[in-house]
Image (cartoon, grey):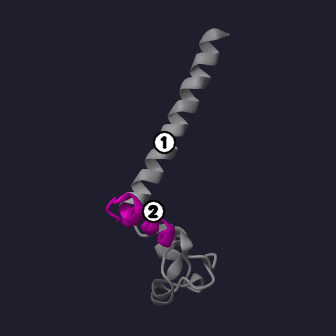
């Protein structure tokens, strides 16, 4: 990170602190994220609303872990499909 990029870039480059558009307006101001992210923050609110409806506990880290697990599962399925195609060829 160069000095002219501002403090928010470090937050976004660290996978443990980057929450994408889930940062609230207050967090964006405090962390220097203004102008670095799209203006929408509805993602986190949508997850909380869904959690309230389904009765699940809402935790932003849980949401991120579940999203990562879905991506990995999709990648694994694609890799298995490619392997089957190679074996059949």
Residue 9: horizontal and vertical position, in percent? 53, 76
Look at the image and say whether residue 55 sits in the magenta stretch. yes
SS for callout 2 = helix
The furthest residue to the right: 89
Examine the image and state in which quarter residue 4 appears. Answer: bottom right
Residue 15: horizontal and vertical position, in percent? 45, 63
Front residue of 29/40: it is: 40
Query: Residue drawn at (58%, 85%), measured in percent from left and top?
Result: 34
Q: Quick check: 73 left or right of 38?
A: left
Examine the image and state in which quarter residue 57 appears. Answer: bottom left
Q: Main secondary structure of the magenta part?
A: helix
Q: Is residue 65 above or below residue 77?
A: below
Q: Residues within 10 Å of mark 2 (few under 14, many from 20)?
A: some
* Residue interval drawn in magenta: 44-61
Look at the image and say whether residue 58 sits in the magenta stretch. yes
Q: Is residue 4 above or below residue 15?
A: below
Residue 35: horizontal and vertical position, in percent? 63, 83
Distance from the alpha carbon under mark 1 to that under mark 2: 23 Å
Mark with earlier residue (1, 2)? 2
Query: Residue drawn at (54%, 38%), measured in percent from left and top?
Result: 75
The furthest residue to the top: 88
Between marks 1 and 2 in the image, the one whose residue lies nearer the viewer: 2
Which mark identifies residue 72?
1
The furthest residue to the left: 57
Quickly name the residue at label 2. Answer: 50
């Amino acid at each position: 990170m160069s000095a002219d990029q501002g403090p928010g870039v470090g937050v976004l480059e660290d996978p443990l602190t980057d929450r994408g558009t889930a940062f609230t307006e207050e967090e964006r101001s405090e962390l220097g994220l203004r102008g670095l992210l799209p203006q929408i923050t509805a993602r986190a609110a949508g997850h909380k609303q869904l959690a309230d409806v389904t009765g699940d506990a809402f935790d932003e880290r849980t949401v991120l872990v579940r999203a990562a697990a879905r991506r990995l599962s999709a990648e694994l399925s694609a890799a298995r499909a490619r392997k089957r195609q190679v074996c059949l060829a």
